Image (cartoon, rainbow, N blue to C red):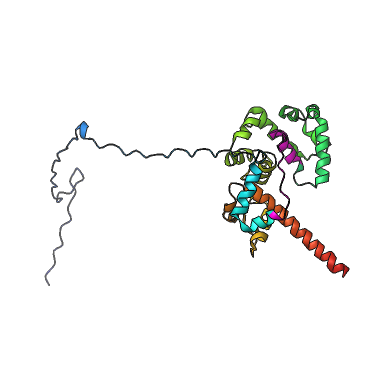
């Protein structure tokens, strides 16, 4: 039987390379230099300019604004027009409202309390502040109150911390009466919700009833959502994220549209009570 001869395994040389390895040829490459004048310009990413701030619209308490709002809403939404015709018009008084700091401090005190209990605590709060006798509640005066002083009049420890945080931000200049008045709705919401204890709903109520801003939609407010459901005869309660599309036609007077949703819900409740009394008496 013929023996097959296996290929000899190449032995490494002293340098560690195989003696049977084929020699590899290299070809030099010519490096072509691009003349400076012909260099391709680098692509520069264009950054769009920042969006301009939302302009602050005239307040609803300004002369003629409420009339313009009612005219627009009646023309834009036939269903809302019926509610407007059967309901007394809102009154956004032109008399000076509380300063921004005072109004926000009051909002904190009233949170999650019955109206009567909140009013009693608010009255005791004003009695603690010497400046309140002149109708002003200053950040410095609130910062001078200890948490124990506030707890003694019925303010919870958490709300005391909220009041001090609000006062500190006004005192430091992060917020001011002028900046609050000058900011658009989106910027104001972003700034005020940084304050402890102030959420989106509180800011929306502040913008509508203290600043009289005309185009604020409190999309998370249960009463407004139920009013929209009743107005458009929706099967389900609209979600907060659906409210903007449903109320788009009310722009730029969504604050007034929201006010009528509260009244619509009240009138429905009154009608239900009246019907129950009628059934009970019959």
The x, y position of residue 179, in whole percent, is 61, 32
Residue drawn where x is 74% and y is 44% of the image: 111
Nearer to me, 154 or 170 = 170
**Quarter location, residue 196:** top right
Q: Is residue 222 visible?
A: no
Which residues, given as a range, are shown in magenta? 85-109
Judge left or right: residue 272 versus residue 189. right
In magenta segment, residue 234: no
* Picture layout, residue 9 above or below residue 41: below
**Quarter location, residue 264:** bottom right
- Most extreme residue toward the right is 281
Nearer to me, 170 or 34 = 170
The x, y position of residue 269, in whole percent, is 76, 59
Q: Is residue 100 visible?
A: yes
Judge left or right: residue 152 versus residue 31. right
Judge left or right: residue 252 versus residue 94. left
Which part of the image, by quadrant, shows the N terminus?
A: bottom left
The x, y position of residue 83, in whole percent, is 69, 56
* Picture layout, residue 66 above or below residue 278: above
Which part of the image, by quadrant, shows the C terminus?
A: bottom right
Nearer to me, 53 or 6 = 53
Residue drawn where x is 80% and y is 27% of the image: 130
- Most extreme residue toward the left is 2
The x, y position of residue 134, in whole percent, is 79, 27
Residue drawn where x is 78% and y is 59% of the image: 270
**Quarter location, residue 172:** top right
* Picture layout, residue 270 above or below residue 204: below
Residue drawn where x is 66% and y is 48% of the image: 256
Labels in figure, total: 0
């Amino acid at each position: 039987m013929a023996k097959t001869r296996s290929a000899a395994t190449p032995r490494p040389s002293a340098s560690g390379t195989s003696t049977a390895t084929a020699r590899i040829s290299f070809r030099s490459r010519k490096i072509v230099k691009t003349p400076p004048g012909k260099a391709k310009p680098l692509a520069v990413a264009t950054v769009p300019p920042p969006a301009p701030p939302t302009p602050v619209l005239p307040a609803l308490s300004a002369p003629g604004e409420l009339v313009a709002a009612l005219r627009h809403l009646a023309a834009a939404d036939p269903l809302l027009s019926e509610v407007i015709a059967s309901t007394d018009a809102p009154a956004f008084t032109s008399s000076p409202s509380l300063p921004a700091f005072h109004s926000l401090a009051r909002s904190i005190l009233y949170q999650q309390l019955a109206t009567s209990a909140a009013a009693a605590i608010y009255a005791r709060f004003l009695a603690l502040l010497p400046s309140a006798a002149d109708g002003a509640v200053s950040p410095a005066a609130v910062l001078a109150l200890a948490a124990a002083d506030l707890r003694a009049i019925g303010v919870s420890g958490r709300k005391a911390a909220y009041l001090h945080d609000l006062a500190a931000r006004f005192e430091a200049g992060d917020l001011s009466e002028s900046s609050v008045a000058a900011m658009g709705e989106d910027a104001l919401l972003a700034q005020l919700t940084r304050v402890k204890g102030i959420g989106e709903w509180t800011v929306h109520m502040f913008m509508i009833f203290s600043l009289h801003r005309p185009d604020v939609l409190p999309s998370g407010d249960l009463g407004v959502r139920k009013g929209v459901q009743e107005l458009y005869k929706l099967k389900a309660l609209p979600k907060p994220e659906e409210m903007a599309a449903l109320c788009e036609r009310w722009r730029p007077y969504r604050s007034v549209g929201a006010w009528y949703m509260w009244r619509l819900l009240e009138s429905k409740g009154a009608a239900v009570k009246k019907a129950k009394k009628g059934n009970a008496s019959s």
